[in-house]
Amino acid sequence: QVQPLVRVVARKFGWSFRYAGVDATLDTADDFILENELYLPVDRSIVLELESEDVLHSFYLRNLRVKQDIIPGKRQLVWFSIISSKVEQGKIYDILCAELCGWGHSRMNGRLYPLAKEKYQVFLAEQNALQNQVTMGGANTP
């Protein structure tokens, strides 16, 4: 069974991305969360787990032709690949909600950062180190 790389949580009016971390398994100690910023590897199968905290939303990556409605109370998976020859190196892509979800719907924008496989591994390691630094620093301070 393929494990999701990221859990995407939609809520009025933003995106929360819980990354599986270096162990590639969600809900473990090395997970970390970023708000409205999604980093994904190129040229690899990607599985995202989607859920909504409140109302209907729709996860939409228009440049990648990926769209999946998100129903509150139900976890869904979306599976796709980012082909390196189809995206521009260093370009940031929009993550939109394609379902009218309330007064702040137009502000529900995220950013997708496609990374080469090696850079994605560096990103995970950096986030893991940052998380450990914050955790260790918090434990040692009065």
Image (tube, rainbow, N blue to C red):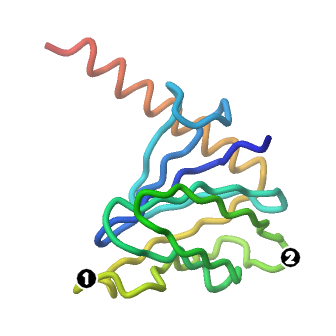
* Label 2 neighbour load within 10 Å: few <14, some 14-19, many 20+: few
Q: Residue at x 63, y 57 (%)?
A: 48
Task: Name, please, the residue furthest toward the left.
Answer: 142
Q: Residue at x 49, y 58 (%)?
A: 74
Question: Residue 61: percent from the left, percent from the top?
Answer: 60, 78
Q: Residue at x 78, y 51 (%)?
A: 117
Q: Number of callouts in the render? A: 2
Image quadrant assignment for residue 139: top left
Residue at mark 2? 85
- Where 111 falls versus 16 (above or below)? below
- Where 12 falls versus 67 (above or below)? above
Task: Name, please, the residue furthest toward the front.
Answer: 73
Q: Tell me the amino acid under the disc marked 1.
A: Gly
**Is the N terminus in the top left, top right, bottom left or bottom right quadrant?**
top right
* Label 1 neighbour load within 10 Å: few <14, some 14-19, many 20+: few
Question: Residue 4: percent from the left, percent from the top?
Answer: 66, 48
Residue 18 left/right relative to 76: left
Q: Residue at x 51, y 29 (%)?
A: 129
Question: Residue 20: percent from the left, percent from the top?
Answer: 59, 40
**Is the C terminus in the top left, top right, bottom left or bottom right quadrant?**
top left
- Where 106 falls versus 127 (above or below)? below
Q: Tell me the amino acid under the disc marked 2.
A: Ser
Residue at mark 1? 104
Question: Residue 130: percent from the left, percent from the top?
Answer: 45, 33
Residue 75 left/right relative to 101: right
Residue 24 left/right relative to 94: right
The answer to which of 80 and 88 lies nearer the viewer is: 80
Q: How far separated are the C-alphas under marks 2 and 1?
A: 34 Å
* CB atoms of marks 2 and 1 within 8 Å: no
Residue at disc 2, secondary structure: helix
